[in-house]
Amino acid sequence: MRPTPIDPDIAVDPPVPSQAKILLAIALGGALGSCARYGATLIWPGSLWTTFWVNVTGCAAMGVLMVLITERYSVHPLVRPFLGTGILGGYTTFSTYAVDAQHLIAQHRACAAVTYLAVTLVSAVLAVWAAAALTRRCVR
């Protein structure tokens, strides 16, 4: 038996976008996010710091986004795949992070590589946590 909605103007089961619409939203968002990352590499070429800051700022943005769309606002079902998986997924980069570490190892700088991997990981997790906490505090 289906529950009766409290407000008859609101559907009990919100419409779910088709797979094609979700994939299109992710693809468009991914194109925009990867262009933003490419722009960062044009501004700061060949630097580990570029990859580091792209990943940390992308994780912070994800913390803000998730609080806003899961705790604060009711948004269209395509917003999360477009912004989260698409734009922020295209903006952040695990592959360049791994290649940067590989380059350090190839330069016989294994300690620097391990440090880079660990500092990036810890910073990214802290960025999500801090951004989410700050967003919760600001939107109350």
Image: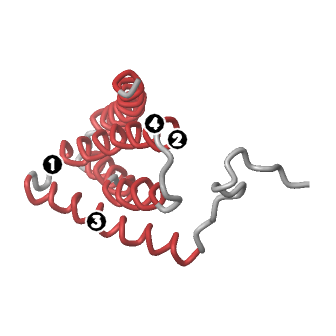
Relative to residue 26, is residue 135 depicted above or below? above
Residue nearest the viewer, comparing 42 with 31: 31
Which sits earlier in the primary sequence, circle 2 or circle 1?
A: 1
Residue nearest the viewer, comparing 53 with 26: 26
Instruction: Give how far across and how far down residue 24 sits, in percent.
Output: 45, 75
Closer to the eye: label 1 or 3: 3
Secondary structure state at the residue bearing disc 2? helix
Residue 70 image label: 2
Closer to the eye: label 2 or 1: 2
Tell me the amino acid under the disc marked 3: Leu
Tell me the amino acid under the disc marked 2: Thr
In the picture, the quarter occupied by the N terminus is bottom right
Which sits earlier in the primary sequence, circle 3 or circle 4?
A: 3
Residue 47 image label: 1
Report crowding for label 3: few under 14, some 14 to 19, many 20 or more residues within 10 A (C-alpha).
some
Which sits earlier in the primary sequence, circle 1 or circle 3?
A: 3
Marks 4 and 1 in Cβ contact (< 8 Å): no
Residue with the mark numbered 3: 32
Residue lying at the far left of the rendered structure: 43
How far apart marks 3 and 4 lie (CA) works out to 22 Å
